[in-house]
Amino acid sequence: MATISKEDIIRTADLARLVLTDEEAQMYSEQLSEILTFTEKINEINTDDVTPTTNGNQITNVLRKDKPVQWEKQDEALENAPEHEDNQFKVPAIMD
Amino acid sequence: MALYNYTIKQVENMLHKKEISAEELANLSFEQIRAVDGDVKAFLTLNEENVKAKAKKLDEEKTYGKKLAAIPGAIKDNIVTKGIRTTCASQMLANFDDPLYDATVTEKLANEDSLMIGKLNMDEFAMGSSTETSSFQKTYNPWNLDHVPGGSSGGSAAAVAAGEVMFSLGTDTGGSIRQPAAFCGIVGMKPTYGLVSRFGLVAFAPSLDQIGPLTRTVEDNARVLEVIAGHDANDSTSSKNAIPSYVDALVEDVKGLKIAVPKQFLSEGVSEEVKESVKNALQMYELLGATWEEVSLPHLPYADAAYYLIANGEASSSLARFDGVRFGNRSDNATDMIDMFKQSRTEGFGEEVKRRILMGTTVLSGRDNFNEAYFRKAQKVRTLIANDFKAAFEQYDVIIGPTTPTPAFKFGEKIDDPLTMYTSDILTVPVNLAGLPALSVPNGYTEAGLPLGLQIIGKHFDEQTIYRAAYAYEKATNHHKKRPNFGGASE
C-alpha cells in the first residue's frame, strides 16, 4: 500500500518547481497513492538477477569527431527568450 | 472530389496525367477542413499561405517527381516546424510562434514536396489517451462526435478519418498512434524504436517515443514511412540500418505466415465485441494460408505498471527544460529566479502534466529507496517483457491481438479517474517497452458503428512483414472502404 501524504506532495512539488493549492495537493496525494499502489504489483515478480533496461535499443556510445565548428546562431538562439541582454538570457535575481 | 476516396498512388497518377494540379489538391484539403473541422476540431494551426506558395511552385515545375509531391499531409503539434507555431497543445508553448528549426521528419516530408497543411491537436505534451487534456480544444471522433478520437495523436487520426488530409504524423510512447488509429478506423504504424529520428520531437519519454504515419490505407502508410525513416546524426538513438522499400513488401501473400496470439491480450478487460473481431480476423488469416497459435507472454500483466513508472519518471526529466528562461511561458508574477521557475511552470502546465511530473519525481527520488523500489524495478520488469517477446519471435513471424480493449469511449468517461485512463493502454504499452514495431489496421465496426483495430506486432526492424500481413488482410476485407457518415466532399 503506497501512501503519498499531502506533505510529501508539497515537498515533491517544490522540487519539481510547481506551486499547488491546498486542494490540489490533497487531490494529487490521493491519486498518487492509488496509482503507486497499482504499480506495486511489479513486486510480485522476482527480479534479483535481472539487468534493468535503460535505453530504447542497444545503441550505445555514439561518437563523432571532435571538430570545432563555426557557430554563428547566437541571435537566433536568443530569439525566443522572454528577456535577453548583452547576448545573454536575462532572468530575475536569485534572491533579493 | 473527396481526398478520402483516393490513395497517394492514385493521386500521383492523376498529377502525372495532368488530371489534377497541386493547387487543386491544396484547395480540396482546405475546403474539407472548412466543411468539417468546425465539428472535428483536429487542427490547431493551419499553414495556408505557405502551402499555396508551394503548390504554385510545384505546378510551375509540373514534374511532380518526388515521393509525396503535392500530397496534403499534417503534423502532430509536438513536432517542430520552422516558422510555424508549435504548442504541444500546452499553455507553456501557446506563444511559441517559431521554433526556429524543422524536425528531421518535417524536413524529410518537405524534401519530398508534400504540402504541410497544418499542425494537429493532441493531449498536452502527449500525455493522455483521448486528446481531452489538450489545453486548447477537444478533438471529436468523425465516426461519432460524442466519442473521443483517442490520444494522444487524436488530431492526427481524426484529420485523416475526416478526409481533411491524406496522411498525418503522430507520435507513440504507449500507444498514441495505434489507439487513435483504431478508434478512428484508419491505419497507424509505430516503427521500431530508432527507425525514425526524434530530432525536433518534443520529448515525453525518450526511451519510448517514436514518430509514425497515420493513413487510410496500408500502402499509403508504407509510402510515408519510407520517407521519414532513416539514420540521423542529430539523434544518437537513431539506427544506422539501411531502409528497405516498404512499398515493395506489399504483396498479397501470407501463406505460411506464423502468427502468435498472446492469451494475455484476450483477457477480462477486453470487450466481447473486440474478442469476436479478433477471432474473425484470425479465421480470415487461416483462409489466406497463415497459421496461428495461442502463446503466453507471462509478464504482460505487469507492463502497464512498469510503463507508467518508466514513462512518468522520464517525463519529469524531459519537462524540466520548461522553466521560462530560454523559451516558452515566463510568468509576470515572479519575485525571484526560483519563483519564476515555479510560477512559469505552474501557469504553463495542465493537470495531467502536473500529475505525471509529480509521479515521475516521486518514483525517481532517493528518499526511502523509492528510485530502487519503483523506477529501477520497473526497468527490470521491462527487460523481462522484452524477453517474453523475444522468445515468442523465435518461433513466430508476427504477434496479433486487439489494439484496444474497447472501441472509442465517450467524452468524460475516463478523464476523471486517471487509473481508469491508464489501464486502457494495456494492449499497446508492452510494444513500446520492447522497442518493437506495431501497426493497427481497421478490423470492422461495433454494432454501434464504431471502428475497431487489429494490432500486428513484428520483430525489430521487420516493418516489412507487418506491412505484408496488414496489406493481405486489408485486401481480403473491406473495412477501410467504409467512411464516416460525414460532411464535406463525398465523391
Image: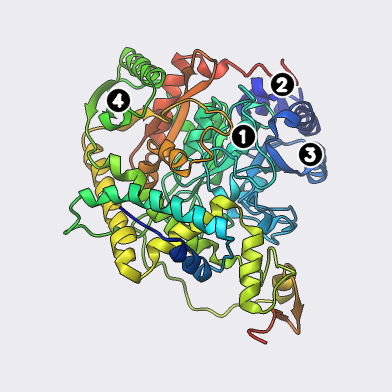
Q: Nearer the viewer, mark 3 or mark 2?
A: 2
**Image coords of residue B115 (percent x, y):** 71, 40
Cα gap from disc 4 to disc 1, whole angstroms: 29 Å
Mark 2 lies on residue: B2
Answer yes or no: are tags 2 and 4 on the same subunit: yes
Cα gap from disc 4 to disc 3, whole angstroms: 43 Å
Q: What's the residue type where badge 1 is placed?
A: Phe
Q: Nearer the viewer, mark 2 or mark 4?
A: 2
Q: Chain of mark 2?
A: B
**Image coords of residue B176 (percent x, y):** 50, 41
**Image coords of residue B485 (percent x, y):** 66, 16
- Residue plotted at (52% across, 27% down): B408
Disc number at residue B257?
A: 4
Q: Chain of mark 3?
A: B
Q: Name the secondary structure under disc 1.
A: strand
Mark 1 lies on residue: B167
In this view of the protein, which residue sits in the foreground, B312 or B379? B312
Q: How is the structure coloured here?
A: rainbow
Answer yes or no: are tags 1 and 2 on the same subunit: yes
At label 1, counting other C-alpha atoms closer than 10 Å, the crowd grade (few under 14, some 14-19, many 20 or more) is many
Q: What's the residue type where badge 2 is placed?
A: Ala
- Residue plotted at (69% across, 41% down): B137
**Which quadrant would the N terminus of chain B be assigned to in this image?**
top right
Q: Chain of mark 1?
A: B
- In the picture provided, is A59 more to the left or to the right than A11? left
Answer yes or no: are tags 4 and 1 on the same subunit: yes
Disc number at residue B55?
A: 3
| Label 1 or label 3, whichever comes before in sequence order | 3
